Image (cartoon, rainbow, N blue to C red):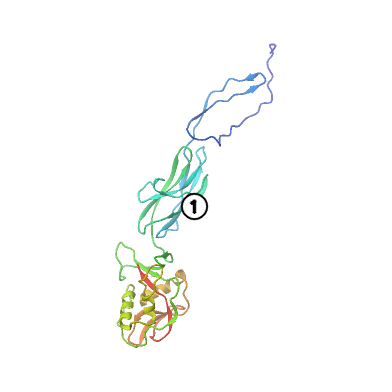
Amino acid sequence: SSGTSPIFSGFTADTLNLSSVPPSYNNYKFRCVASNSCGASVPSNPATLTIYIPTLTTTAISGIQSALATSGGNITSNGGAAVTARGVCWSISQNPTIADSYTTDGTGTGSFISSITGLTLGTTYYVRAYATNGIGTAYGNEFSFVAAFAIGQNYQGGILVYILQPGDTGYVAGQTHGLIATPNDQSSGISWYNGSYIATSATATAIGTGNTNTDIITASQGAGSYAAQLCSDLVLGGYSDWYLPSKGELNQLFINKDIVGGFFNNMYWSSSESDGLWAWEQDFSNGIMNVTSKNGTLRVRAVRAF
């Protein structure tokens, strides 16, 4: 004005907050405009804002059991738009997506934990974390694992106590079989026999022979209240094929007694007899196995095979 240079003062730097911009499409165009009492300036050159899918990694698999496992992820960038869903996805094929099985574990960036459920024993699974914003869904790196058993886990009516090894009766290469124990004792004191000192021929002691022993004992002794019959009559967790463990199977219960739980520091019957008068038992206070008269009243813990 009046041929003189205008005097400018009071400049401030303004920041445009784009956190609430809906990412319904990409490549937003922006121009800056300044104004004062004399009017508005010419708009600036255009600038482009590009929104991306999130950036994230997958957490390594842990806590693997027969039907579940734990994973998760860490979202380090939302890509410029809010993360509206996150979790992990898994499949029996590589590169799983949310078209497969998946979890929903909140929103936003940062770390999260996911539980993978509904697994099939012995199956290989592939897992990736995912994160979704308005542009799309991003996936983390891939991990694989095999759904496997763990001693002490709940399974098929009881608690897993032993996995069959090569040489065990019932072992099949490439398959998983083993023993399940009831969660608690079936008796705090009961006799091995039904009142008659007879040799039943239930003399097998190896792992995998307790079921046959029990069948032989109950066929020889008949009806009544005694250790083998107590186990044979048991129905628990929807299963009715429980039996009195053999000497070798009982020893596996002792080895894993702290994991399985519920045992007492007393003697427990096995289904393995020594002769017409004596049968094998194990002291769970020290692990010593010995023969005891069949009329003794010892504790009982039933098992079943799977």
From the image, tell me which residue sits under label 1.
Answer: 113
Q: Would you say 99 lies left or right of 26 here?
A: left
Question: In which image quadrant can residue 16 be found?
Answer: top right
Question: In which image quadrant can residue 241 be found?
Answer: bottom left
Residue found at the far front of this picture: 223
**Residue 149 sits above or below residue 265 on the image:** above
**Residue 45 sits above or below residue 269 on the image:** above
Give the quarter of the figure containing the N terminus.
top right
Q: Position of residue 95 (x, y in %)?
A: 38, 46
Q: Amino acid at mark 1?
A: Ile
Question: In which image quadrant can residue 18 be found?
Answer: top right
Q: Position of residue 43 (x, y in %)?
A: 57, 22
Q: Position of residue 149 (x, y in %)?
A: 39, 62
Q: Would you say 81 lies left or right of 90 here?
A: right
Q: Position of residue 64 (x, y in %)?
A: 42, 58
The secondary structure type at the circle numbered 1 is strand
